[in-house]
Amino acid sequence: MPRLARYGWFTLIFNVGVILLGALVRATGSGAGCGDSWPTCEGEIIPELSGDTAIEFLHRSASGVALVLVFVFAVMVWRAFPAGEPARTGAVVSVLAIVGEALIGAMIVLSRWVADDDSVARAVAVPLHLVNTFLLLGALTLTIHWVSGGRRLDTVSHRSTWRWLLLGAAAIVLISATGAITALADTLFPKDGIGLDLEAGSHFLSRLRVIHPILAVVVAIIAWWKVGGSVRSGDARLIVWLVGAMLISGVANVALGVPVWMQLVHLALADSLWIAYVLMGARAIGSDRPLRAGALVPE
């Protein structure tokens, strides 16, 4: 593996770690640990580290390191590849996405959409943050694919596969966005057991959390019905296994009372699924050979 690709994988994995730290901040209600100041913490560069402040400061510090790692990766890619190469485009999108992460994070802190805030604005900002996170992970994954010698995407020759890949990507992003809302509701309005919370007097976030598990199960069933029985490629088999692991971890998460560690496991699987899906898609439509019928999606 080229050294640039190894650095890219390190950057990608580090960003996944930052995402998990962000989930830890939300799950522990530590988002107000630095008050409403940004990028400083309560006006200090290095605050007294204890409790919520330590967790929030750790996340901010890791986010800053991630920003530098992505910028360095982009510079290395631009120096290694000539104009017109897709790796350069992927690097630029990665930089834009990591900057977007910082700006959305700043907006959430400065607007005080943290801790116990249950506003509509926060309910919009949280899934928006996740969608931008997936853009970052997807751009980094594609860039790593290209710097590793992967072919550029050919959406014309593989038009049918491309359409199915886009549909699958949209489904994963939608399920993950509703999952972000469910996780927020679980943090703000914890409940015992698996029962639904659809009473008229319940908070809207509490009522919305049922959408995520229903959508995830329905999409998983449809996907398996369409392609599960004909999966042949190793990439596609990995996707199937990750989807299965996510369903199991989701059930376990609820059954155990959504403990923080299980939330992090579920999110790590979601990020892994997205990275594997993007990589699989890039390989599927980057080959000069047409995809075998039934290997990934129905023709």
Image: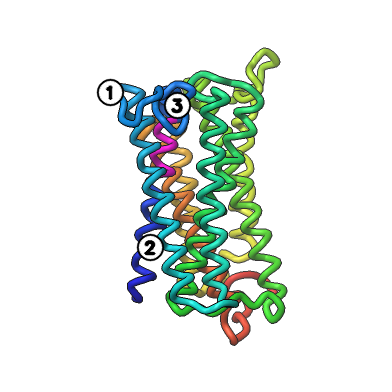
**Residue drawn at 68 percent across, 59 percent down:** 167
> Which secondary structure class fits the magenta region best?
helix
Q: CA distance from mark 1 to mark 3?
A: 16 Å
Q: Position of residue 220 (x, y in %)?
A: 59, 52
Q: Name which quarter of the figure residue 249 lies in.
A: top left
> Of 292 and 167, which appears nearest the observer?
167
Say whether residue 265 is visible: no
> Of 191 and 222, which appears nearest the observer?
191
Reading the image, the residue beneath label 1 is: 48
Judging from the image, the colouring scheme is rainbow
Q: Secondary structure at mark 1?
A: loop
Residue span colored magenta: 18-25
Reading the image, the residue beneath label 2 is: 9
Spot the residue most to the top: 201
* Lower position in the chain sequence, tag 1 or tag 2: 2
* Lower position in the chain sequence, tag 1 or tag 3: 3
